[in-house]
Each structure stands twice: as structure tokens, then as C-alpha cells.
Image (tube, helix red, strand yellow):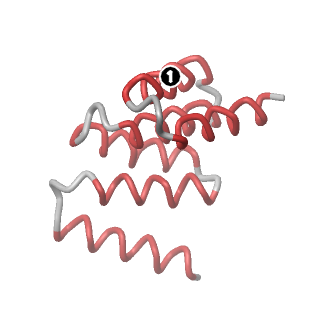
């Protein structure tokens, strides 16, 4: 369906710009939004190799880890994102999402 078409488009973008952190970052966000946390983590780990301290990368990677059961590691990454960009709302929103999911 449409998710498969979107994955194919991300694959093509990755082939065209393999050194661009935005491609695996946005593919990771896409997978995260679909609830495919292991796939999201894999893409976000690739994004992190290209942008190791990017707060968006850290926040989403941390959230993906937390959602797939690696909560402590995930929370630490989200906290790193908060320290890297204290006024950014995204890390705070994802931390809230992680805490809600934990119950």
C-alpha cells in the first residue's frame, strides 16, 4: 500500500544522497509514526552516524529505543537532546510520549 510506496521513495532518496542525515532521519520518523520501532531505531542509528549530536536524531532514537523496551537507554538519549536544545519542544513531547506509554 501507501506505506510501501513511501518506503520505496525513502530508499530512492537514500541511493541519491547516501551522506544526507535527513534521509534516514525522516525515514526513521516515518517508521516511528507507524509504530515500527525496531525499523525506526535502525534508520535513526544510521542518521546518528551522520549527525551524532543532532537533537532531533537523539530524541527520536531515544523514543524508539524506549518504545521497543530499551527505556533507560532511550530516556538518556532524549535527555541528551534536551540538553543539546533546551528550548526545543520535540524532546519534551517525545519524553512525555515515552512516559505515557510506560504507564
Query: Taking 83 as reference, is 47 left or right?
Result: left
Identify the residue at horizontal 30%, vertical 60% (top origin): 23
In the rendered image, which residue does mark 1 sit on?
Answer: 79
Query: Taking 44 as reference, is 51 left or right?
Result: left
Which of the 4 image quadrants contains residue 86? top left
Which of the 4 image quadrants contains residue 75? top right
Identify the residue at horizontal 36%, vertical 69% (top origin): 10
Front residue of 12/101: it is: 101
Disc 1: CA contacts within 10 A as few (<14), some (14-19) or many (>=20) = many
Identify the residue at horizontal 77%, vertical 29% (top origin): 102
Does residue 33 sit above or below 102 in this rendering? below
Does residue 94 sit above or below 22 in this rendering? above
Identify the residue at horizontal 46%, vertical 75% (top origin): 6
Quadrant of the image containing the N terminus: bottom right
Residue 74 in the image: x percent, y percent?
54, 26
Secondary structure of residue under mark 1: helix
Query: Taking 98 as reference, is 102 left or right?
Result: right
Amino acid at each position: 500500500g501507501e506505506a510501501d510506496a513511501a518506503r520505496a521513495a525513502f530508499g530512492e532518496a537514500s541511493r541519491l544522497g547516501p551522506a544526507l542525515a535527513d534521509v534516514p532521519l525522516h525515514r526513521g520518523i516515518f517508521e516511528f509514526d507507524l509504530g515500527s520501532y525496531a525499523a525506526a531505531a535502525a534508520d535513526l542509528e544510521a542518521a546518528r552516524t551522520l549527525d551524532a549530536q543532532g537533537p532531533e536524531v537523539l530524541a527520536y532514537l531515544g523514543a524508539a529505543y524506549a518504545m521497543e523496551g530499551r527505556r533507560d537507554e532511550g530516556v538518556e538519549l532524549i535527555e541528551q537532546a534536551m540538553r543539546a536544545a533546551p528550548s526545543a519542544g520535540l524532546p519534551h513531547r517525545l519524553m512525555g510520549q515515552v512516559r505515557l506509554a510506560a504507564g
